Amino acid sequence: MNAFMAVVIASMLSRLGYQMARSPILPRFAQDLGASPELLGVIVAASTITAFSSNFPPERSPM
């Protein structure tokens, strides 16, 4: 496998992991594993805070 394909696969896995965390799948998965309702709230909150803090502000154009 060349370096380009390794980067493509890593990027794809990263995006799939992010989508899983942002969709209802992760809390449902945690619930099936026996997580309490309070822990489900923490999981969703952590996912939201992580997504919010990892977004970069838009670049300002020079005037």
Image (cartoon, helix red, strand yellow):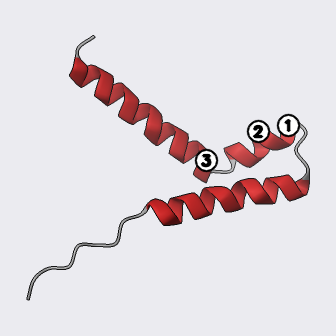
Residue at the spot x=59%, y=64% of the render? 49
Specify which label sits upstream in the sequence, 3 or 2.
3
Inspect the image, locate mark 2, and give the three-letter code of the amino acid beneath it. Answer: Phe
| Residue bearing the label numbered 3 | 21
- Of residues 63 and 17, the one drawn nearer to the viewer in this rendering: 63
Disc 3 residue crowd, few under 14, some 14–19, many 20+, Cα 10 Å: some
Of the image marks 1 and 3, the number of the one nearer the N terminus = 3
Where is residue 57? Give x, y as percent: 34, 72
Instruction: Note whether 18 is above or below 50 in the view shown.
Output: above
Q: Quadrant of the C terminus?
A: bottom left
Q: Marks 3 and 2, Cα distance to the nearest angstrom? A: 10 Å
How crowded is the residue under tag 2: few (<14 C-alpha within 10 Å), some, or many (20+)?
A: few
Res. 32 mark: 1
Q: Nearer the viewer, residue 28 or 37?
A: 37
Q: Residue at x 52, y 59 (%)?
A: 51
User: What is the number of the mark on residue 50?
Assistant: none
The residue tagged 2 is 29
Q: Amino acid at mark 1?
A: Asp
* Residue 5 image offset from top left, x and y in percent: 27, 21
Q: Mark 1–mark 2 contact, CB under 8 Å?
A: yes
Q: What is the three-letter code of the residue carrying label 3?
A: Ala
- Residue 20: image quadrant is top right
Decide: is 33 above or below 58: above
What residue is drawn where x is 31% and y is 29%? 8
Tell me if residue 30 comes above or below residue 58 in the rendering.
above
